[in-house]
Amino acid sequence: MRTSSVALLLGVCVLLLSALTVCAVSLSVSPNLQQFFTAASVSLTCEGQLGSDGWTVKRDTGSATESCGAGGRGFGRINGPSCLFNEFEPVSGVYWCEGEAGEKSEEVNITVSDKEVILESPALPVRTGSDVTLRCKKKTGGTAAAYFYFNGRPVGPTSEHIITINVQQSDEGLYWCSTDEFGSSPQSFLRVKGPLPPTTTTTTTTTDTDVSHPPSPSLPPPPLQPFIIPVVAAVVSLVLVSLVLVLVRLLWKKHTVHNEAPSNDVTYSEVTSRESSNKMPVIQPEMVYSTLRTNTTGTEMRDKSRKTRDTLRLIHLL
């Protein structure tokens, strides 16, 4: 299972790299036309942001695949990154740029015709919303008044020398022109791509008066990204919930311990009361001393009284 997942991941990476490689190099046609007369001068160039080293212009004529500048089996001649045609043969073909590893750019259809008129239409794809001008060009030079057709239907009711189309996606298809005097041109397929993504550009103008003014203060740092605020709020909420859960757990534990205490426990007050009821009364030392003193005083008085009586008795006898 793990091996298959790794293999799948590698396959996805290879496809992504291949797609990036294909998009990195494209075939440029100068002039940007699909149809040419014999003996026209055309330049095909492989262009890319990372350069075009190792890329070769190739074509498929339907019967063979040929490379630019490949001796007797090729066509044209190499001039730096470009493939130049000094003279076209009357052969149509599909052209593209191919790298050393076999990666390819987008294909471009080019038709070389020996007819009296050709249709001038872009060889490279056009963007929606852009204006495209179509002409019916004569072999002897100039443009001819012609009827223009799109997928077999006439574009307008009258013959025109040129027509301009504000291209939409529905305008993609086959076009050709037809004249009463020179016949019809070959057909060409107009390719349409979506519009470019909107880009924000800022322009800065400097005038002579700007020199006398001090430079503007630096702008404050940009605010936090919108997605940071929900993340911070979620983290704070999680911390608060955790603290509440801990507090509830402590209170519940304390309540449980209090309720689990045995009901027959003897409190301190009960123990004190029981001990007080079981003990004998204690005679305080002061009370004993007072009692002894009282007893002693009574005895001394009786002795004195007895002596007094004896003395009186003796005097009476005398």
Image: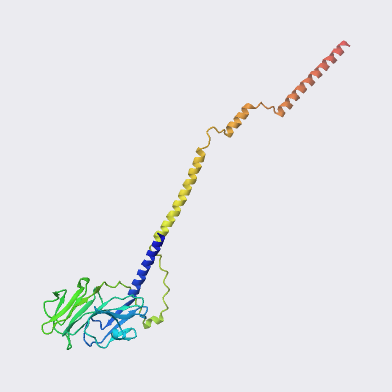
Q: Residue 182 at what x, y percent from top left?
A: 13, 84
In this rendered view, identify the residue nearer to me: 33 or 235.
33
Q: Is residue 230 visible?
A: yes
| Residue that extends furthest to the right in the rendered view of this protein | 318
Label total for image: 0
Q: Is residue 311 left or right of residue 236?
A: right
Q: Residue 12 at what x, y percent from top left?
A: 36, 66
| Residue drawn where x is 48% and y is 49% of the image | 246
In this rendered view, identify the residue nearer to me: 246 or 17.
17
Q: Is residue 39 left or right of residue 147?
A: right
Q: Quadrant of residue 47?
A: bottom left
In this rendered view, identify the residue nearer to me: 263 or 164.
164
Q: Is residue 201 visible?
A: no
Q: Residue 222 at what x, y percent from top left?
A: 40, 68
Q: Residue 173 at what x, y percent from top left?
A: 20, 73
Placement of 268 over or under 186, stated as above or below = above
Q: Quadrant of residue 147?
A: bottom left
Screen quadrant of the N terminus = bottom left
Screen quadrant of the C terminus = top right
